[in-house]
Amino acid sequence: DQQVKQNSPSLSVQEGRISILNCDYTNSMFDYFLWYKKYPAEGPTFLISISSIKDKNEDGRFTVFLNKSAKHLSLHIVPSQPGDSAVYFCAASASGGSNYKLTFGKGTLLTVNP
Amino acid sequence: EAQVTQNPRYLITVTGKKLTVTCSQNMNHEYMSWYRQDPGLGLRQIYYSMNVEVTDKGDVPEGYKVSRKEKRNFPLILESPSPNQTSLYFCASSLSPLGYNEQFFGPGTRLTVL
């Protein structure tokens, strides 16, 4: 059962435009969400996160929006740059209980065209 | 430099030949974890460790063993590798297991089991 879903395997945008990457989750116990970026031949690196007590978190060109009622979050990149081309993973965790796992989605390959 | 290191980076082996992938972090992190990345499946957690001598199964632990005798090291052991364990493996660490703590990933180990 896939608890974190990234339904778009790939996304292509023009440089300077907005990139919107989407993520849906099914586990209502998830209360913290993170986005990781991964370049080829490297490990994932942390990008931005959001707690369930917020609905928006912004860091420079990156903004994450959380809609708890829809169990949906999205990552906005504005403006997109060619260096943003990478695989983006959405991840979620539940702070309660004894299960300290981070559950990842399958990833979305973002290509930003010059 | 704060980092997570893995060795080897690339390994080709044969079915049944025991192997160990080492992981070490220099950030004094309590929490360490192993993931595998497969096409179309994203990142899946194999095992994690809350601290020295404390380990627990992730989502796909079958065929793997781990140990945590020292805080900095978290080796992944394949006692009898099989072709379905051909994958890209990542070790990660974070300050604590709580979900809001950023996980730092190693560069990855690409394993091929013939």
Image: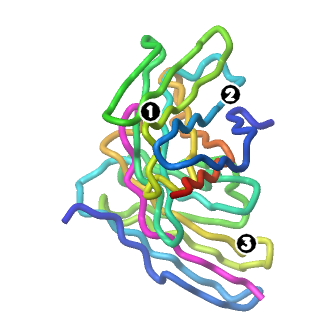
Dots 2 and 3: beta carbons under 8 Å? no
Residue B38 in picture, x, y percent from top left: 70, 62
Residue B17 % position (x, y): 69, 89
The foreground one among A45 and A2 is A45
Element at label 2: strand
- Amino acid of disc 2: Asp
Image check: A67 left or right of B59? left
Q: Position of residue A17 (x, y in %)?
A: 51, 39
Q: Nearer the viewer, mark 2 or mark 1?
A: 2
Mark 1 chain: B
Look at the picture and state if A42 lies above or below A21.
below
Is B26 positioned to the left or the right of A103 in the image?
left
Q: Nearer the viewer, mark 2 or mark 3?
A: 2
The correct choice, above or below, for A52 with respect to A81 in the image is above
Task: Say what secondary structure mark 1 lies in.
Answer: loop
Residue B81 figure quarter: bottom right
Q: Residue tagged by mark 3?
A: B85
Residue drawn 43% across and 20% down?
A51
Q: Chain of mark 3?
A: B
Q: Nearer the viewer, residue A91 or B47?
A: A91
* Residue extent of the magenta highlight: B98-114
Say which mark, if any, is on residue A67. none
Dot 3 surroundings within 10 Å: few (below 14), some, or many (20 or more)? many
* Residue pictured at 79% horizontal, 72% vertical: B84
Residue B14 belongs to the span the image colors magenta: no
Q: Residue at x 66, y 47 (%)?
A: A11
Q: Which residue is mark 2?
A: A24
Of pointers 3 and 1, the one earlier in the residue sequence: 3
Residue B30 lies, in percent from the top left, at 32, 48
Point out the image quarter for the N terminus of chain B.
Answer: bottom left
Disc 2 crowd rating (10 Å Cα; few below 14, some 14-19, many 20+) is many
